[in-house]
Image (spheres, rainbow, N blue to C red):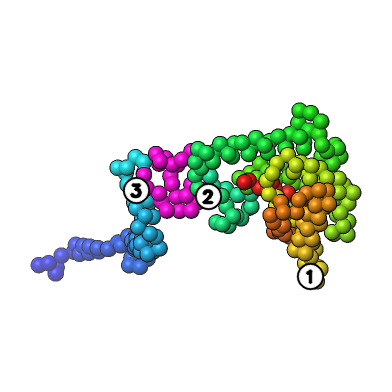
Amino acid sequence: MSGDSNVAPIIIKRKKVVAGDGHHGGAWKVAYADFVTAMMAFFLLMWLLNATTEKQRKGIADYFSPTIAMTRVSGGGDGALGGDSVFAENTLPRVGTGATMLRASPDSAARGSFSEGEEQDRAAEDEQFKQVEDVLMGRGGESMVADETLKHIVTRVTDEGLIIELFETEDVQLFEDKTKPTALLRDIAQVVTNAAGFVTNQIAIEGHTAAFPLVLAEDPAWTVSSQRAVVFRELMKAQGLEGKRVQRVTAYADREPSRRNPMDYRNNRLEIIFLRE
């Protein structure tokens, strides 16, 4: 009988091994991430449908369509290309967008494309500006400005017009006691007034200052920049400039520095603009 056998019974133990036990596994995290991504894409789509115009939606759809090589439809934006793609076949080589201000508003920024006649007018105006620059800076001949004075003048042509920038150096100032013009500035005013005689364009004068120390009870930057611009206008009028040619006098305080350091002396400057007609 089996009970009388001397052979020990064989016991088999089966152990169940689980690779990822319930919530300790990581598979659910991948699924949850996919779900969150899908929800984000869904809400982004809903926002685009609500925040864009039909023309803008058409531009977005054309952008993502693999069957359209180049789009004829504007994206509807208001950036440098006015919403057009640089690859669109009807994008003009020159869109005529720009302004001299660092943060120009839609009203002050030049916008739109130029007709053939306007292009010719701009080219002629650019040539006049170049002649004024050449005479003022002494390129190819005698300069209207002494070498020491020339160190304080920089010119450039922009969409707004010819800009003559007058700035201070570390050892030479344009104003004494904040708003009193120095002999150097009076000489420069005479030179700029003479240069204005080469063109008939209207003139804008802008005043800029370096930042004043924060320990002052009141920041005088706005008052000083405004008074300096007005003083220079009066200097030009005293030198023979017709007062009606000054279209605007603007104060920018320390809001548009030319150097990264807001207290840099180079930020103390005047900008005289011969505006395009």
Please give the residue where the numbered disc 3 appears in the rendered image.
62
- Label 1 or label 2, whichever lies nearer to me, is 2
Q: Secondary structure at mark 3?
A: helix
Task: Tell me the element at label 1.
Answer: loop
User: In this figure, which residue is indicated by the disc labeled 1?
Assistant: 218
Residue 44 position, x and y percent, is 39, 61
Q: Could you say which is closer to the camera, residue 206 or residue 209?
A: 206
In whole angstroms, how far apart are the C-alphas of marks 1 and 2?
Answer: 38 Å
Q: Residue 242: within the magenta?
A: no
Q: Residue at x 65, y 35 (%)?
A: 127
Q: Earlier in the sequence, mark 1 or mark 3?
A: 3
Coordinates of residue 34 in the picture (x, y in percent): 35, 59
Please report the residue visible at 78 percent of the width from the left and 44 percent of the height from the top: 192
Q: Is residue 86 magenta?
A: yes
Q: Residues within 10 Å of mark 3 (few under 14, many from 20)?
A: some
Which of 22 and 249 lies nearest the eye of the viewer? 249
Kindly report the distance in space between the C-alpha atoms of the residues bearing marks 1 and 3. Answer: 54 Å
Occupied quadrant, residue 180: bottom right
Residue extending farthest to the left is 1
Q: Quadrant of residue 206?
A: bottom right
Q: Amino acid at mark 1?
A: Glu
Q: Residues within 10 Å of mark 1 (few under 14, many from 20)?
A: few
173 displayed left or right of 10: right
What is the chief secondary structure element of the magenta stretch? loop
Could you tell me if residue 98 is visible in this image?
yes
The amino acid type found where label 3 is placed reads: Asp
Q: Give the residues in magenta.
A: 72-93
- Name the residue rendered at 32%, 47% in the picture: 65
